Image (spheres, rainbow, N blue to C red):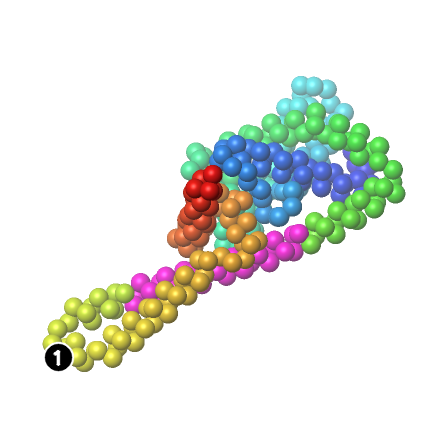
Amino acid sequence: MFYYSTEQWVFFFYLYCLFGWCFESSYVSLKTGRFVNRGFMRGPFLPIYGSGAIMMLVVSAPFESMEAPGRQILIYFAGCVGATVLEYVTGVVMEALFKVRYWDYSNKPFNFQGHICLSSTLAWGALTVIVTEYLHKPFERFVLAIPDTVLSVSTVALTAVISADFVLSFKAAMDLRDVLVRMEKVREEMAHMQKRLDVLIALTGEELEKYREEVGELRDKYKLHMADKARLTEMRDAVQRRLIRSNPSMMSVHFGEALRELQAKLEQEVQEKRELLKKKQ
C-alpha cells in the first residue's frame, strides 16, 4: 500500500473522514433520538477517523505478506497501540487548546485521564482488522479506478473546502474557549461579591451605615455581572452553538459549570421549539 501516490493517500484520508462521520453521526443520532451532525467540523468529516484509518493502514503494512490468522492477530495489537496513542495525543492537544473534551471516558472502567480507556482500545484493534482486511479493499478499488486528472482536481477541491471548514471551526472553538473562560471569571467574581454582600447586609445600625456606599457599589457591579453572564449564555454564534449540540458528551475539567450552563441553555431552547411546534400542530 506504500505505492499509493500523494493524491491517493489524501483522498483515502478524506474518504475515511466521511465514513467516520457517517458512522458517528448515525450512532449518536440513534442514541439521542434526534439527528446529530457529529464532530468538530461543520461538514460531514471527522478528521480523527481519517487519521486513524491512515495510521491503521501504515501499522498493518509490515504484516501484509504473513498468513492468517497470525497476520490478523498482529494487526489487531498494532491497531490497539497505534490508535490508542493517536486518540490520547489528539485528546490532550484539543483539551489544551480549547479547554474542553470532545469525548470523555472518565466514567468508563480502566480509563486513563478520561482520554482513553480499555474498551476503546480493544474496539480500535477490532476496527483496525475490519478496515485493513475488509473495508479498505473496496475503497482501494474505487480510488485506484479514478483517473489521475480527476483525482488531482477532486483532491484539490476537497482540500480547499475542508481547510476552510476547519479554519472556521477552529476559530469557533477558540471563541467558545474564551466564552467559557469569561463565564468562569464572572461566576467567581459574583460568588466573591455575594459573600461580601452577605457579610455587610448582616450588619445593623451604625455599622451598616459605614458600609452603605460599598453595599451600593457591590449591588451595581453584581447587576452588571448578571447582565454580562446573560449575554454570554445567549450564544449568538451559530458555529459555537453547533459545536456544543454536535458533541453531547463534551465536558470541561476546569470550566465544567460554565459549559453545563451553555448546554442547559441550548437544551432549553430545543425544548421550547418542540413545544411551540406541538402547539402549532
Q: Quadrant of the N terminus?
A: top right
- Crowding at dot 1, Cα within 10 Å, few <14 / some 14-19 / many 20+, comes out as few
**Residue identified by numbered label 1:** 206
Q: Is residue 92 visible?
A: no
Position of residue 177 relative to residue 72, above or below, is below
Q: Main secondary structure of the magenta part?
A: helix
Q: Position of residue 211 (x, y in %)?
A: 21, 78
Q: Is residue 280 visible?
A: yes
User: Splitting the image into 4 quarters, where does residue 55 fall?
Assistant: top right
Which residue shows up at 57% across the image and 53% down it?
A: 239
Amino acid marked by disc 1? Glu
**Nearest the eye: 133 or 200:** 200
Q: Position of residue 190 (x, y in %)?
A: 33, 65
User: Splitting the image into 4 quarters, where does residue 233 fall?
Assistant: bottom left
Which residue shows up at 65% across the image and 56% down it?
A: 167
Position of residue 78 relative to residue 182, above or below, is above
Q: Is residue 162 magenta?
A: no
Position of residue 177 relative to residue 82, above or below, is below
Which residue shows up at 41% across the image and 55% down it?
A: 258
Q: Position of residue 136 (x, y in %)?
A: 72, 30
Total numbered labels placed on residues in the image: 1
**SS state under label 1:** helix
Position of residue 137 relative to residue 93, above or below, is above
Which stretch is magenta? 165-193
Specify whether 178 is left or right of 77.
left
Which residue shows up at 36% across the image and 64% down it?
A: 226
**Residue ranking furthest to the front:** 280
Q: Position of residue 221 (x, y in %)?
A: 34, 72
Specify whether 252 is left or right of 19.
left
